[in-house]
Amino acid sequence: SQELEQSPQSLIVQEGKNLTINCTSSKTLYGLYWYKQKYGEGLIFLMMLQKGGEEKSHEKITAKLDEKKQQSSLHITASQPSHAGIYLCGADPRGSNYKLTFGKGTLLTVNP
Amino acid sequence: NAGVTQTPKFQVLKTGQSMTLQCAQDMNHNSMYWYRQDPGMGLRLIYYSASEGTTDKGEVPNGYNVSRLNKREFSLRLESAAPSQTSVYFCASSERLYRDSNQPQHFGDGTRLSIL
């Protein structure tokens, strides 16, 4: 079955610093999703990547999928306290979108 | 824009009690899902419904039943609650028109369920 490994498990940064979160798959990714979750709330969809080498940006967050489609990274530039939360990657391993498998998440803390 | 609405938001049950978690989406999505989220385990799929009239087991279906009432609503039932079912439950939905088209899942705010 598809497994997703996220690193780091947690991250504490000073406001204004850049950071990167990684998501590595044991199998080829046909669709990779990034979500953000604030404590006690639901998951908010950030971005979806499908093609090898694809890169998408939204405000100060950039996500990339490598050419082999087995690793994705989420990069935040000039972090702000509003970026704090849990970031999860989710994979659709067979293009079916029925059984989305999630990584265990990365807890991001941004200190003012 | 309501999106995916889950009720209730919080619930405490005693072991052996039954309960139904409700989920409704207003995005005209075909597919709906139920997940549970536990510390250290991440999000795990309980059941899903690819389209109205169909349901299938996910990764952890034991102890649960589901009903796809119509295109909008997908409920999760615990027939005899056990402490191991204490968790946060999330409902999600996605559009699923074409097999080769990936569509993101949109999540509700969750139901926090404690079983004593």
Image: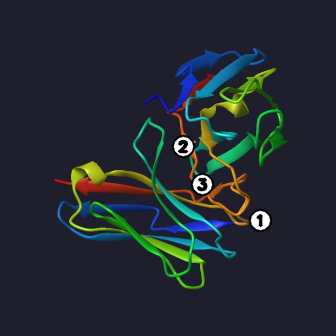
Labels 3 and 1 touching (C-beta < 8 A): no
Distance of mark 2 from mark 3, alpha carbons? 9 Å
User: Do the dots labelled 3 and 1 sit on one chain?
Assistant: no
- Nearer to us: label 1 or label 2: 2
Q: What subunit carries mark 1?
A: A
Observer-nearest residue: A47 or B59?
A: A47
Observer-nearest residue: B113 or A1?
A: A1
What residue lies at 26% left-to-right and 49% top-to-bottom?
Answer: A82
Question: What's under tag 1, amino acid-wise?
Answer: Ser
Q: Is residue A30 above or below residue B90?
A: below
Secondary structure under the numbered disc 1 in the rendered image: loop
Secondary structure under the numbered disc 3 in the rendered image: loop
Question: What's under tag 2, amino acid-wise?
Answer: His
What residue lies at 68% left-to-right and 75% top-to-bottom?
Answer: A26
Question: What's under tag 3, amino acid-wise?
Answer: Gln
Distance of mark 3 from mark 1, alpha carbons? 21 Å
Q: Position of residue A111 (x, y in %)?
A: 21, 55
Q: Which mark is residue B103?
A: 3
Observer-nearest residue: A78 or B42?
A: A78
Q: Which residue is mark 2?
A: B106
Residue closest to the far front: B97
Q: Position of residue B94 (x, y in %)?
A: 62, 45
Q: Which residue is mark 1?
A: A1
Q: What subunit carries mark 2?
A: B
